[in-house]
Structures are given as structure tokens and as C-alpha cells.
Image (spheres, coloured by chain):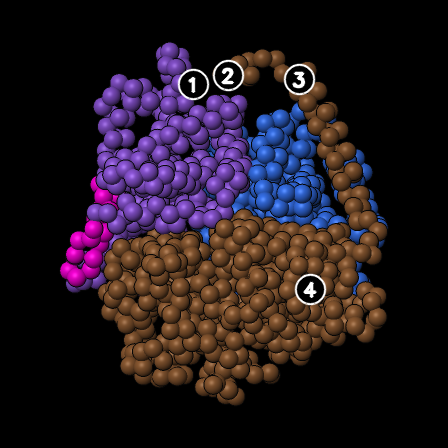
Chain colours: A brown, B blue, C purple
């Protein structure tokens, strides 16, 4: 029917076939040639894995990547404020290798990163699924790896219970829901009904379960009116919002993130959801600047830790915020903070180990020994590697109410309450779910 | 066709020692890639089998996932670690489901078969996502595999799982090749060409399609179990439509010319993906899409047509 | 009582969204027998273009009331440009090939466009929410519904009636119907099938982009919004019968109402509703609700 089909294709096809075969063979045998050069003694190669495509790129992956670029360049130039003002990490310049977490083959990519790229360590992983898959491989391959964001407490509670090479510098997600429950009760002690709208996958399910259990543990009389679980990335929440409004609950808990959270805000404000009910957005901090005045006043926002606008004042924080804003045109949110503190944690461990080796690059074993139970400073305050034998970090966390300050034209947080780490994190040896059910045994709140 | 004269069978038989030798020489990461591609290549082989009968399955991930979860759940919840038992489960469970579903699926052809298979795979996905006990989208990990009492660890374990994958994949391919070159296999082509005439000749296309459906499910189930053992982790993504789409992709790109084609094609595609992710972490999907377009445009018989002597149509 | 009313209204709103998003897909399949996975990309491109243009328009201080026309213009522009690009550039080379191969081609195009969108527009979200709130809300038994959502219902009806009228009441439409029924015979009768294909693909793309453009004010436009839409549109189209506009409308209604009922009464079932409906319909009507019987060639 078309001109191409009518033309005689015999000779053309044969030529194309032979040329393609040659190209394919050449490519297949040429490419896997080893690309790793001899390790330059003056370079520290770090693999950084975050989402660079898909729905998680905008709110999490790319801000984390930006923070990594910023901090690494500043480290290499020696420009980070004290106590990190030495060049590089243990004297070596840092060379990052970025990998997209959205590749659907995280384990294969991790192995390639370690064995083909021969990175010295890996920092990354936002999705809990990735973390659960990669964790055992880390211990098998024996390469220092730092999880910086993924939330599931199961990494050290169930998957790798005796970690050696794996660290997590980000506190896990239990503290988000526990702190949310506490903050809610402090704000509204007479609350009787709650409802939830969470994405129907592990993160949403776990967040809701933790929150519901925490509220029940703190105030057993509270009734759950409805728990909505729309598909992740659904984008259209009209029906769910109707169901929430019809339930006449006083409070709505949501662990929505990214485009879904923003759609919920836009569609909810249009229908008065935020006016009728108190809405908790446990990851709301990431959108407060993007949404700006469109975020309803008085929404309870969390930042998965003392990050972003929750971060305590310090020269390190001021430097980080200013550098990030100057370079990227927007204030850093919690993924950026968590990446920065992961890198600074690594530097801290390396520098501490290097003190004992008199300037030589410390071995991986020495760095691990230094990293365990480390306490160090970050733009969001102190980080303590206190759980799971010193491999899991704990931090304080904070919740606050959103307020758009018209005078300065910026989004701010008011009525901020900080919860110290021991209040909202389970103690060593106790699993998160059991800890909540037990009524927070061993919690030390101020 | 006797064994000695069948080039494909000889080639496949030689492939086993070749792969094992390669496994000893190749760097770890490349060997792991090969392992994972053999597993997903088996699922693509299941798609190829059905394609030869004129059916396109956009939901082969259903059986890939069932095989993986059968092995995974036995390992994680029942403590079964023997790799051969897990493989057997990876065959039995998907086959059982396929026997049941086949009664419905065998009635459909073309785009409806494709859509219905997609629907069922997404239903499984939904069930697994809802199942919080199974970790929902996080999935769960498998314990270390053992081999009839032999419990290796470290490098030996890695090689053992690799060896198992190679032997299993090639054996399945050989069995499938024998099936396809038998009258029962050729009748699939007849059904694809003109189903009505097959009916007139006295055979029931529905039964034959049902049988092929179950065989394809079993093959994909093996692939799923092998994938679970290799990666050590399973999650519902194995049943998502993009995973099934990938299998169809590999099947079409490699061509339906030979049983070895999807296995090799899966590996080549993985290589393209790895390099795409490495060299352009921001736009690797575009590179993958462009590669696919080029292959479809210039190699209508798939990559296998480069190797095959006769120009076989798609 | 409130729940039943809510289910009906929510179902209608969701159904109208589903229909707007699927009608282009069923049209393209009906005429060209191509199941266009790149439809999702057109939806995303429509949304991005709309958000970008509305942002520029409102930033320029023009009257907000005409921003709806900007949405429409964005959809038309995107549909025309990318429709021509995809059809002339790639699909034209593949006509006459196996149906499934065409699906694979559109899948490859979808992958390329996903990243192209990311490169052009970046990963940050785009907002164009002013048109959403502009018309205010209307109270239904105490539940507020934005008038915009009812506008979407009207839009879906208009699109459906428009396409139906175009196919059945205009001369061009009748030529198109001839091509749907028998491509070879149409060529034999002198119908310029190549031009028909191009026009159909452009209209189908515009409809896909229309869905995206009018959804943009309700959401934040981020990478990946096209992916979810694909499976939903496919399901609706298959339920209604491939190529049938009326079928797509009924299919969208069934899915919309079923989903609304699930969300209000049994939220756990929401995930399965669309696939459950599809499986049920196909079990009893193997070709969808309104598919025309296909002739078998002996």
C-alpha cells in the first residue's frame, strides 16, 4: 500500500541485515570491556542512587541529587563550614556516580555499581522496596552502603538484623506517624474521630497503620471513620474526598506525597475539605514552597524529621539553605537535607577513622568502626547512630501548622513542636509495631 | 527430527557448558545480568510460544509473578530452601492457575486475549498490593538457597544459583524446542494461520490453545522462580503491566524464529538498559524506546532474523 | 441517602473523565486498528501544554474567564503537532504490519515521549489551578461539588456527541466508517485512506490531549501522569467494545459508578473494580459491550 512496500526490498534488506548484525556484534563484545581504571588514590568514588524519572523524581529524587551535587562540590573545594571544612573526604576528592533508582532492576544496578564502576561506597535509595531488596546484597557484597531516605523500619528489624556494611542515616517512618499522633492530641485534645486517605501501597498502608495504632495507644476512645486507599498516582480524588466529607470526621491523616498530595490539596480546597477537617500531611513539608499560598492555612505539616523549615538555626544550616537557594532557586526540602546529612555522616566517619591512621586513607573496616554509634552535626541538627548496633540513625522530629506570611511572601510554619528522638523512636531491641502497641514503652519525652 | 541432526538442540546442549564456563570467567555483575536475563527470557519464551499460535499475551507477568511468589512464600513463610523444590513449586502453582484460567482464556483471540490476560495480571497485582502480610509493594526476601542438602555460601552460592539458572533455562528451552518441532507444536502455527480449517480437520483449537496456555504459564513460572532465587527478593511489580510489556517486547524484538532467540534477546536488551542508565541517567527510557523503534523498523523478523538463513516473516 | 447521591454524582464526574480520556483511543483503534499506547503521552503533553500556557496567560494579566479557551487551544495545538509527528514520522512506515507490532511501536514512542516531556518541561510540577476554582462550588445535599467538575461532564458529553455526529452525519464521517469496515474495499473505491488515517490520528490525539488539558487545573502536572491513564483508557475501551464511541461512554459510566460505589461502601475493593468489571464484561460479551460482529474469513 505504501511506497516503501511497493519498492523492491531484497537487496536493501540484505544490506541492512548484514550491517545491523555487524553493529550488534561489535557493540556486544566491545561494550563489556572493563571501564574501571586503576583506583586513583586521591579520589573517593561514591555511587548515588535516587529517582531521576517518574513521579518520585520531582519531590524527592532530584532535590536529593541536587543536594548531593552541591555538598560534594563544596566538600571538594573545602567550602563547607566547620566542622567539615577540610577538603574532600579523608583528603580524597569525591567523584559521584549517579544512578536512576527507577530502573526496575535495583539489585542488578547495585551490583553493577559496586562491581563494574567499583565505587568505594553507595549512598541512596528512597523506595522501601528498593531498600529491602538491596539490604541483603549489601551484606553479601560487603561494600559500605548508606540508605538515606527509605522509611520502612523493617530494614534492620527484619531483613538484615545484624548489619555490618549497611547504615541508615535517615530515621525511619515510625517516628513520623507517632509524632503526628502526639502533635494532633496536643493541638486538639478533644478529638473523637479520625479518617485517613493514603496511597494503596506499602508506604501508605504502613503510615496509616502506624498512625491509627499510635492514636489508639494514646487515646483509645478515638474512632476511625473511614480509611481511603486510592491507587498511587491516581490523581483524581473527587470520590474519595466526597467519602471523607460524608464521613464527617474531624481529622484526616494523609501520607500522600508528590503530585498526589498536591492534587489532593487542590481538589480538597476546592471542596472545603481543609476548612471542615484538620488535615495532617506527613510529608507536606516538601510542597510548602511549591504550593505556596495554595496550601490551606492551618494544615498540619510534617517533614520526616527536623528538616527544611523545621531545622534549628546553625551556621551549617544557614550555609546550606543559602547555597541551595542561590543555586537552585528554591529552598531545600527534606530529601535534600537527608542527602546532605548522609554525605556529611560519611565524611564524619572517614575523618574520625583517618585520625587514627595518620593521614592515610582508612580501610572500609576502620570507617565502619568509626561510623557505628557516631554522633555528628548536620544542617538539621544532631544525628545519632543509636539503634541497631549503631547502624540506624535517630533524630528529633517536628510538626507545625502551615502559614503563608504575606509580608515576606513566603510559606512558613507556626506552632512548631519538636519531639526529641527518644520520644518518637523505639528503643534499641524493640520492634516499632510492638513498641507502639505496648503504649510506647521506654519512650522519654520532654 | 533426530537429535543429532537438529542444530538448535545441539546448539542449546553446547550452550550449557559454554554458559558455565562464561560464568567462571565473566565479572560478577555481568554474570548476574546474564542470570537475571535468562529468567526473564524464559517468560518471554512463554510469550513467544503463545505468539506462534497467534495469541499475544500482555499479561505473562501473571505467571512470572506466581512462580516467583510460589517460590518466595515457600521460602519465606514455610522455610523451604531447597532450590529444586522451589523450582517445582514455580512450575506447579502457575500451571494449576493456568489450567483454571485457560477455560476462559482459550475462548479469546487477538486483542481480547491480550486485554484479558492484562486484566488478570493486574488483578494479581492488586491482590498482592493489598496483601500487607506479604509486604505489599515492598515485597519480601527469600532465604539463601540450598541444593539437595548442599548449603553453599558466598561466591559458591552465587555460582550455584547461576549454574541452576543456566541449566534450568536451557533445559526448558530444549524441551520446548522438541515440543514445537513436533506435530503438537506445529498445529499452533496452523491455528494462527486459519483456525477454522483446523476445526474442519477435526481438532479442537480451543483445547490446543488451552494446552499451549498452560505450557507457557509453566515456562514463565520457572522463569519467575529463577528470578526470585537470583535476586533474592520479590515484589508485586513482577505482575505489573509494564513487566509483561517488557516480555512481549523481548519476544518481538528477538523474533519467533527459535527458542534461543528470546533468551539471547533478553540479555541484549538488559545490556542496552544498563548502558543507557549509566550513560544518561536522565533519559535512559528514551534510548530504550529509540532502540526498540529501530529494531522494529529495520528488523521485522526480530534480531534472530540476522542469524537465520531464511528470511522468516514475523 | 447522601451516600447514594454522592455515589451517583462522583460516578458521573469520574466517568466523564474516563470517557474524555478514552474516546480518542477508541476512535483511533476503530479506524486504524492501532491500540495506541502513546495516547498516555498525548494526555501528559496536553496537560503540560495547558498548564504552561494557562500560567503564561494568567501571568500576562488577561481575563481569567477565557483561560478555558486557552485549555482548549493547548489541546488542539498539542494534538495537531504530535499527531502529525507520530503518524507521518513513524506510524506511516508500519502500516500493513501485524496489529501487535503496532502496539509495540506505540509503546516505544511512549517511552521516548516520556523522557522528552521530562527534558522539555523538567521534573518540577506545573500548576494551573485558577480555572478550577473560578466557577465556584455548588451544594448537593450538603456536599460541595465544584462547578468545574460539572463542566467536565458537559465537556465529555460534547466530545462524545461531537465525535458520534461527525462519524454518522457528515460525509467525511461516512467515508471514515467505510474505512473502518473494510480498508481494502475503501481503497478500491478511491477513498484516500492515507489522508483519512492522518486526520483520524490527529483528532484522536487532540481528544487525548483534551483530556489532559482539562485535567491540568485539578492536579499538579508531574512526570508520569500519562502512565496510569493508559491502562484505565484501555480497560474502558475494551469494555465498551473497541471502536465504539457509545460503548466507551457506557463503559466509562459502568466503571465510574462501580468505582464510586466501592470507594464509598468498600474502599478495599477499589483497586480491583476496573479489572473486575472488564473481566466480567468480557466473560459474557467476549468482544465488549457494543462491538460489531467481526466477519471470519475462511
Give the residue drawn at x 50%, y 44%.
C122
- Which label lies toward us, 4 or 1? 4
Mark 4 = which residue? A85
Check contact, mark 3 vs mark 4: CB within 8 A.
no
Q: Residue A328, position in %: x, y? A: 53, 51
Give the residue drawn at x 62%, y 26%.
B298
Label of residue A12 in the image? 3
Count the numbered circles shown.
Answer: 4
Check contact, mark 4 vs mark 1: CB within 8 A.
no
Q: Nearer the viewer, residue A368 or C56?
A: C56
How would you rate the neighbour count of disc 2 (Cα within 10 Å): few for under 14, some for 14-19, many for 20 or more?
A: few
The residue range painted magenta reads C136-156
**In screen coordinates, is C30 left or right of A340?**
left
**Quarter occupied by residue A211:** bottom left
**In screen coordinates, is B272 left or right of A128?**
right
Q: Looking at the figure, which quarter contains the C terminus of chain B?
A: top right
Check contact, mark 2 vs mark 4: CB within 8 A.
no
**In screen coordinates, is A357 left or right of B127?**
right
- Which label lies toward us, 2 or 4? 4
Give SS at disc 4: loop
Q: Is residue A327 above or below residue B256?
A: below
Whether callout 4 and callout 1 share a subunit is answered no
Whether callout 3 and callout 1 share a subunit is answered no
Mark 1 = which residue? C194
Which chain is indicated by disc 2? A
Whether callout 3 and callout 4 share a subunit is answered yes
Mark 2 = which residue? A2
Amino acid at each position: 500500500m505504501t511506497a516503501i512496500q511497493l519498492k523492491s526490498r531484497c537487496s536493501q534488506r540484505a544490506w541492512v541485515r548484514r550491517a545491523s548484525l555487524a553493529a550488534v556484534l561489535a557493540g556486544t563484545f566491545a561494550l563489556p570491556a572493563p571501564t574501571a581504571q586503576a583506583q586513583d588514590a586521591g579520589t573517593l568514588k561514591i555511587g548515588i542512587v535516587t529517582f531521576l524519572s517518574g513521579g518520585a523524581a520531582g519531590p524527592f529524587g532530584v532535590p536529593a541529587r541536587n543536594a548531593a551535587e552541591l555538598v560534594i562540590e563544596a566538600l571538594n573545594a573545602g567550602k563547607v563550614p566547620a566542622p567539615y571544612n577540610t577538603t574532600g573526604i579523608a583528603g580524597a576528592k569525591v567523584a559521584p556516580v549517579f544512578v536512576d533508582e527507577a530502573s526496575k532492576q535495583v539489585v542488578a544496578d547495585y551490583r553493577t555499581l559496586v562491581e563494574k564502576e567499583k565505587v568505594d561506597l553507595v549512598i541512596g535509595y528512597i523506595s522501601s522496596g528498593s531498600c529491602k531488596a538491596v539490604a541483603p546484597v549489601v551484606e553479601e557484597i560487603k561494600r559500605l552502603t548508606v540508605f538515606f531516605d527509605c522509611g520502612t523500619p523493617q530494614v534492620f528489624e527484619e531483613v538484615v538484623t545484624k548489619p555490618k556494611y549497611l547504615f541508615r542515616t535517615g530515621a525511619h517512618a515510625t517516628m513520623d506517624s507517632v509524632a503526628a499522633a502526639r502533635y494532633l492530641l496536643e493541638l486538639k485534645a478533644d478529638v473523637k474521630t479520625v479518617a485517613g486517605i493514603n496511597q494503596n501501597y506499602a508506604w501508605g498502608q504502613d503510615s496509616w497503620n502506624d498512625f491509627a495504632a499510635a492514636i489508639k495507644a494514646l487515646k483509645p476512645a478515638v474512632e476511625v471513620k473511614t480509611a481511603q486507599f486510592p491507587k498511587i498516582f491516581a490523581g483524581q480524588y473527587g470520590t474519595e474526598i466526597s467519602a471523607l466529607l460524608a464521613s464527617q470526621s474531624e481529622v484526616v491523616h494523609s501520607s500522600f506525597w508528590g503530585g498526589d498530595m498536591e492534587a489532593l490539596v487542590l481538589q480538597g480546597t476546592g471542596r472545603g475539605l481543609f476548612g471542615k477537617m484538620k488535615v495532617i500531611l506527613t510529608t507536606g513539608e516538601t510542597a510548602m514552597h511549591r504550593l505556596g499560598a495554595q496550601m490551606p492555612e492551618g494544615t498540619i505539616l510534617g517533614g520526616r524529621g527536623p528538616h527544611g523549615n523545621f531545622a534549628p538555626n546553625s551556621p551549617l544550616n544557614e550555609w546550606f539553605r543559602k547555597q541551595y537557594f542561590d543555586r537552585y532557586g528554591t529552598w531545600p526540602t527534606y530529601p535534600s537535607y537527608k542527602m546532605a546529612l548522609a554525605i556529611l555522616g560519611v565524611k564524619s566517619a572517614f575523618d574520625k577513622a583517618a585520625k587514627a591512621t595518620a593521614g592515610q586513607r582508612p580501610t572500609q573496616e576502620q570507617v565502619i568502626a568509626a561510623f557505628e554509634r557516631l554522633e555528628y552535626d548536620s544542617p538539621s541538627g544532631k544525628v545519632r547512630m543509636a539503634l541497631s548496633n549503631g547502624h540506624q540513625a535517630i533524630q528529633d522530629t517536628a510538626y507545625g501548622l502551615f502559614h503563608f506570611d504575606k509580608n515576606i511572601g513566603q510559606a512558613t510554619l507556626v506552632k512548631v513542636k519538636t519531639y526529641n528522638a527518644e520520644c518518637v523512636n523505639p528503643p534499641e531491641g524493640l520492634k516499632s509495631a510492638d513498641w507502639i502497641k505496648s503504649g510506647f514503652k521506654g519512650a522519654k519525652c520532654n | 527430527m533426530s537429535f543429532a541432526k537438529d542444530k538448535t538442540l545441539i546448539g542449546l546442549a553446547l550452550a550449557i557448558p559454554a554458559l558455565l564456563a562464561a560464568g567462571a570467567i565473566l565479572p560478577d555483575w555481568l554474570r548476574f545480568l546474564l542470570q537475571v536475563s535468562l529468567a526473564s527470557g524464559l517468560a518471554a519464551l512463554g510469550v513467544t510460544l503463545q505468539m506462534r499460535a497467534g495469541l499475544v499475551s500482555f499479561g505473562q507477568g501473571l505467571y512470572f509473578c506466581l512462580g516467583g511468589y510460589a517460590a518466595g512464600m515457600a521460602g519465606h513463610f514455610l522455610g523451604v530452601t531447597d532450590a529444586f523444590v522451589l523450582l517445582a513449586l514455580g512450575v506447579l502453582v502457575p500451571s494449576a492457575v493456568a489450567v483454571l484460567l485457560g477455560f476462559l482464556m482459550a475462548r479469546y483471540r487477538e486483542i481480547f486475549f491480550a486485554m484479558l490476560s492484562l486484566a488478570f495480571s493486574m488483578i494479581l497485582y492488586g491482590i498482592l498490593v493489598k496483601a500487607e502480610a506479604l509486604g505489599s509493594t515492598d515485597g519480601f526476601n527469600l532465604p539463601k538457597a540450598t541444593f539437595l542438602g548442599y548449603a553453599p555460601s558466598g561466591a559458591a552460592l552465587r555460582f550455584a544459583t547461576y549454574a541452576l539458572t543456566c541449566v534450568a533455562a536451557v533445559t526448558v528451552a530444549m524441551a520446548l524446542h522438541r515440543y514445537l518441532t513436533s506435530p503438537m507444536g506445529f498445529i499452533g502455527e496452523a491455528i494462527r494461520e486459519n483456525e477454522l480449517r483446523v476445526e474442519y480437520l477435526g481438532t479442537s483449537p480451543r483445547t490446543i490453545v488451552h494446552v499451549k496456555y498452560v505450557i507457557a504459564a509453566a515456562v514463565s513460572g520457572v522463569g519467575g522462580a529463577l528470578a526470585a532465587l537470583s535476586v533474592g527478593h520479590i515484589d508485586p511489580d513482577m505482575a505489573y503491566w509494564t513487566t509483561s510489556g517488557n516480555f512481549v517486547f523481548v519476544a518481538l524484538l528477538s523474533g519467533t524464529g527459535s527458542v534461543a532467540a528470546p533468551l539471547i534477546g533478553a540479555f541484549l536488551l538488559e545490556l542496552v538498559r544498563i548502558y543507557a542508565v549509566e550513560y544518561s541517567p536522565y533519559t535512559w527510557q528514551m534510548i530504550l524506546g529509540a532502540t526498540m523503534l529501530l529494531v522494529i523498523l529495520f528488523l521485522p523478523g526480530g534480531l534472530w532474523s540476522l542469524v537465520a538463513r531464511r528470511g522468516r516473516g514475523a | 441517602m447522601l451516600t447514594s447521591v454522592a455515589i451517583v454524582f462522583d460516578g458521573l464526574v469520574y466517568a466523564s473523565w474516563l470517557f474524555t480520556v478514552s474516546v480518542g483511543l477508541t476512535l483511533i483503534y476503530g479506524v486504524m486498528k492501532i491500540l495506541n499506547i502513546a495516547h498516555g503521552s498525548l494526555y501528559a503533553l496536553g496537560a503540560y501544554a495547558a498548564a504552561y500556557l494557562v500560567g503564561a496567560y494568567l501571568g500576562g494579566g488577561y481575563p481569567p474567564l477565557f483561560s478555558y479557551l486557552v485549555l482548549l487551544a493547548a489541546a488542539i495545538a498539542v494534538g495537531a503537532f504530535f499527531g502529525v509527528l507520530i503518524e507521518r514520522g513513524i506510524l506511516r512506515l508500519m502500516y500493513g504490519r501485524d496489529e501487535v507490532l503496532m502496539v509495540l511501536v506505540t509503546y516505544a514512542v511512549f517511552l521516548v515521549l516520556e523522557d522528552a516531556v521530562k527534558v522539555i518541561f523538567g521534573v518540577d510540577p506545573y500548576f494551573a489551578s485558577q480555572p478550577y476554582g473560578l466557577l465556584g462550588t455548588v451544594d448537593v445535599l450538603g456536599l460541595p461539588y465544584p462547578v468545574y467538575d460539572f463542566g467536565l461532564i458537559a465537556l465529555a458529553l460534547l466530545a462524545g456527541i461531537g465525535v458520534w455526529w461527525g462519524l454518522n452525519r457528515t460525509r467525511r464521517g461516512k467515508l471514515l466508517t467505510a474505512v473502518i469496515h473494510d480498508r481494502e474495499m475503501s481503497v478500491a473505491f478511491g477513498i484516500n485512506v492515507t489522508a483519512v488515517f492522518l486526520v483520524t490520528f490527529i483528532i484522536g490525539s487532540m481528544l487525548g490531549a483534551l483530556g489532559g488539558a482539562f485535567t491540568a487545573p485539578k492536579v499538579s502536572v508531574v512526570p508520569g501522569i500519562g502512565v496510569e491513564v493508559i491502562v484505565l483508557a484501555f480497560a474502558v475501551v475494551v469494555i465498551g467494545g473497541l471502536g465504539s464511541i457509545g460503548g466507551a461512554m457506557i463503559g466509562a459510566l459502568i466503571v465510574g459508578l462501580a468505582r464510586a460505589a466501592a470507594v464509598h461502601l468498600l474502599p478495599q475493593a477499589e483497586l480491583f473494580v476496573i479489572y473486575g468489571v472488564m473481566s466480567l464484561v468480557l466473560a459474557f460479551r467476549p468482544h465488549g459491550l457494543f462491538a460489531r460482529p467481526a466477519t471470519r474469513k475462511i
